[in-house]
């Protein structure tokens, strides 16, 4: 399978166009269509996504829920509810790390080999991008070192600045 680091890549692009087993959505706790990544995923997946999410209900911060991919190239969507940044005093680091670990648990449970992650919580939720990148990379590499179920992880970043931060975090490991 290769080392954990060889199974991770960073790309700049549109997560709604990535052909992987599951894309991870930066969702809100109500699992209602929001802005940013969440809005783009909802728009690309179609109205069936919200109908499925409405049947699930909400999701606590730090956890994930899984749905079908509907009209996306990905067969599945893992909805991760990241923390709102409150200055680092409200357990934000642990909650963000938990998003990645919970996504891996769902991937294993569903036999998913490839995942695409956005920069969870770094948009309107205000989590510092460099800090989020370090937490994400550390959690993903640790999860990949645990077993070989997931063979391909992509951090799909919306812009060059964010992609650079994820590449730097990966290079620093």
Image (tube, rainbow, N blue to C red):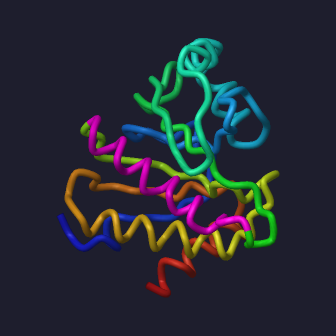
Against 173, residue 86 (above or below) is above
Q: Quadrant of the N terminus?
A: bottom left
In the image shown, does 169 or 109 lie closer to the viewer?
Answer: 109
Q: Quadrant of residue 133?
A: bottom right
Residue 97 percent across, percent down from the top left: 52, 63
Numbered range of the magenta stretch:
90-110
Residue in the picture at 35% in, 73% down: 5
| Residue 101 in magenta stretch | yes
Residue at the extreme bottom: 172
Residue 40 percent across, percent down from the top left: 70, 34
Q: Main secondary structure of the magenta part?
A: helix
Q: Quadrant of residue 135?
A: bottom right
Residue 141 percent across, percent down from the top left: 37, 70
Q: Quadrant of residue 37?
A: top right
Q: Is residue 49 left or right of residue 146?
A: right
Residue 49 percent across, percent down from the top left: 58, 19
Q: Is residue 106 left or right of residue 82?
A: left
Residue in the picture at 56% in, 65% down: 94
Residue at the extreme front: 90
Residue in the picture at 52% in, 59% down: 155
Against 118, residue 146 (above or below) is below
Against 44, residue 138 (above or below) is below
Q: Quadrant of the C terminus?
A: bottom left
| Residue 40 in magenta stretch | no
């Amino acid at each position: 399978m290769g080392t954990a680091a060889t199974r991770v890549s960073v790309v700049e692009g549109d997560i709604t166009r990535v052909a992987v087993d599951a894309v991870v959505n930066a969702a809100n706790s109500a699992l209602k269509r929001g802005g940013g990544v969440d809005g783009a995923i909802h728009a690309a997946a179609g109205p069936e996504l919200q109908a499925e999410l409405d049947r699930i209900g909400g999701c606590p911060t730090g956890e994930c829920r899984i749905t079908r991919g509907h009209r996306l190239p990905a067969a599945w969507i893992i909805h991760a509810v990241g923390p709102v940044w409150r200055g680092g005093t409200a357990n934000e680091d642990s909650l963000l790390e938990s998003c990645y670990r919970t996504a891996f648990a769902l991937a294993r449970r569903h036999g998913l080999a490839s995942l695409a992650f956005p920069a969870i919580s770094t948009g309107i939720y205000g989590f510092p991008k460099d800090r989020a990148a370090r937490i994400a990379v550390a959690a993903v590499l640790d999860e990949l070192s645990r077993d070989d179920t997931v063979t391909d992880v992509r951090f799909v970043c919306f812009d060059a600045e964010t992609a650079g931060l994820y590449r730097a975090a990966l290079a620093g490991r």
